[in-house]
Image (spheres, helix red, strand yellow):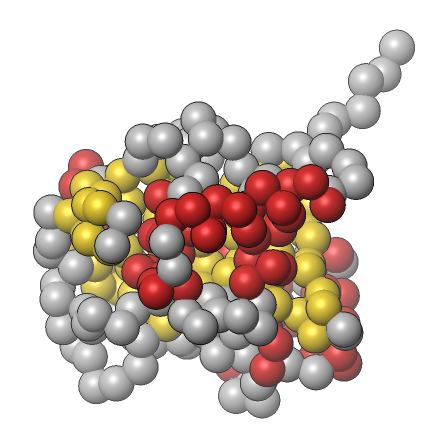
Amino acid sequence: MNITSLSREVIQKGLSDAKARQKTDTNTIRILFSPTEINKNNFDEVCDSYSRISSDDFDSVVVIESQFGSHKRKLPMPSKKYFETSLGQVPVNDKLRNELCDEDDDFFIDDEAYNKNLSLYSQLMMLQCTLDDFSVLSLQITDETSFIVKELAHALEEILASRNTLIVCCCDLNQADKDELEKVMGFYSEKNISGLMNYLNSDESSIKGLGSFITGLLVAEKWGMKLHLNHKEDVLHSGFAEIQRQAIIG
């Protein structure tokens, strides 16, 4: 089972069932970590993350994923005006796409890394069953070096800080073992950015989509967000970062 074969009704039932299982309320979600392929093995955990979003929370979504190959552009964004799934069309946020191109020389409107097998389409199916009305920006990382990832994270945290835009980072966390994930979470909780960058450059990670994962962590750290990871039988499938409520003093 792949999510792209499911109906709106089946996905919405998965979301409502996940919502009913939640024991506590969640603060505003700004970043999701979602597997590159949503299937029967991770569907419940992905629904748990997406069900924490309200239908009117966001009017725009940025979907980030890693695409490997001999691409010339480091951070390409497809030139399409809309993306289409079996649930309908979603317009592209052309204004945000142009803003990123103006931000730095490594952002390009370019179709070289685009293909119909992008994780984007799986995420859109979830989003179309979660949000009422939104636009999307698809962004690929073709070079997972620390310089490019830091550049992307810096641009996103600056441009999106005051906007109601959701960031979806596509990454297969289930491929990493417990020790690796504990190490990464340690870097995050200690605000050890150099540790995260060394980890990214080490070429020792088992995570597919590591650049996307680290991008999300860097933005979440800058925004002072609380990180949650969803496990199933000690296997990590998805997660989210939420805005932390500030303590009231006095």
- Is residue 78 visible to the viewer in this orientation of the structure? yes
- The image quarter containing residue 111 is bottom left
Return the x and y of residue 191 as percentages of the image width and height: 69, 56
Return the x and y of residue 56 as percentages of the image width and height: 44, 26
Return the x and y of residue 42 as percentages of the image width and height: 57, 68
Residue 50 is left or right of residue 75, and the answer is right
Residue 109 is left or right of residue 162, and the answer is left
Please give the name of the residue rendered at 53% of the width and 37% of the height, measured from the top-left corner.
53
Which of these two is toward me, 208 or 107? 208
Residue 14 is left or right of residue 131, and the answer is right
Please give the name of the residue rendered at 34% of the width and 63% of the height, measured from the top-left corner.
4
- Is residue 215 visible to the viewer in this orientation of the structure? no
- The image quarter containing residue 129 is top left
Please give the name of the residue rendered at 75% of the width and 58% of the height, measured from the top-left corner.
190
Which of these two is toward me, 206 or 5? 5
Q: In which quarter of the image is the C terminus?
A: top right
- The image quarter containing residue 195 is bottom right
Give the vertical position of 197 relative to 177 (above or below).
above
Return the x and y of residue 176 as percentages of the image width and height: 64, 81
Q: In which quarter of the image is the N terminus?
A: bottom left
Outermost residue on the right side: it is 250
Please give the name of the residue rendered at 67% of the width and 70% of the height, measured from the top-left corner.
236
Give the vertical position of 48 relative to 16 (above or below).
below
Outermost residue on the bottom side: it is 204
